[in-house]
Amino acid sequence: MRIVKHLLASKSSIIFSVDKKTSVLEALQLMMKENISALLIVENDQLEGIFTERDYARKIILKGKSSKETDINEVMTANTITVKPDDSIDHCMKIMTEKHIRHLPVLANNKIIGMISIGDLVRFIIEEQKKTIQHLENYINS
């Protein structure tokens, strides 16, 4: 069965995060520098929320707030939906589809061990399908 820990093993283990007092502008600069579209908000090693490009568009731009003067905790999404390393890839896809979200932090024993995106899931599924196709072609040709 395809599970989250298999996907995490195939990607970088770097987790980008900021604390709640980080300005939105600083968060955006980090996101641009690292070419990512979401940051975890962490205080004392505990997940407090997530900040995404969608949060920026809806909670800063559309409300006329200042990125420089607004702290991330004012616009982050709290009560973040998370998954566990042993959750299935299909379960993650279902959550993302039903909740209209693109990122899922991965927690093990309440500790952040990674984050997966919809892009990660799609790449993982495509690679798995390629392996299956190759296996079937080899079987047929032998």
Image (spheres, helix red, strand yellow):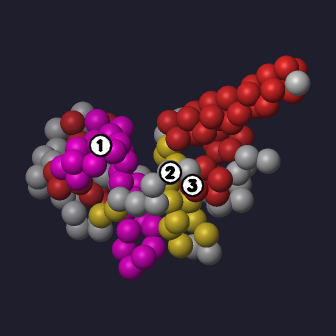
Classify 10 Å Cα crowding around label 2: few (below 14), some (14-19), many (20 and above): few
Q: Quadrant of residue 45?
A: bottom left
Q: How many labels were placed on the picture?
A: 3
* x and y percentages locating residue 141 in the rendered image: 85, 20
The disc at residue 11 is: 2
The disc at residue 35 is: 1
Which region of the structure is painted magenta?
28-57
SS class of the residue under badge 2?
loop
Residue at (30% x, 64% y) in the render? 18
Residue at (52% x, 66% y) in the render? 113
Is 114 magenta? The answer is no
Q: Nearer the viewer, residue 72 or 11?
A: 11
Q: Which residue is mark 3?
A: 8
Q: Point out the tag, 1 or 3, that comes first from the N-terminus.
A: 3
Classify 10 Å Cα crowding around label 1: few (below 14), some (14-19), many (20 and above): few
Looking at the image, which residue sits at the far bottom?
44
Classify 10 Å Cα crowding around label 3: few (below 14), some (14-19), many (20 and above): some
SS class of the residue under badge 1?
loop
Amino acid type of the residue tagged 1 in the rendering: Asn
Q: CA distance from mark 2 to mark 1?
A: 15 Å
Amino acid type of the residue tagged 3 in the rendering: Leu
Q: Of the residues tagged 2 and 1, which is closer to the observer?
A: 2
Give left or right: position of 74 versus 8: left
* x and y percentages locating residue 110 in the rendered image: 57, 73
Q: Nearer the viewer, residue 126 or 35?
A: 126
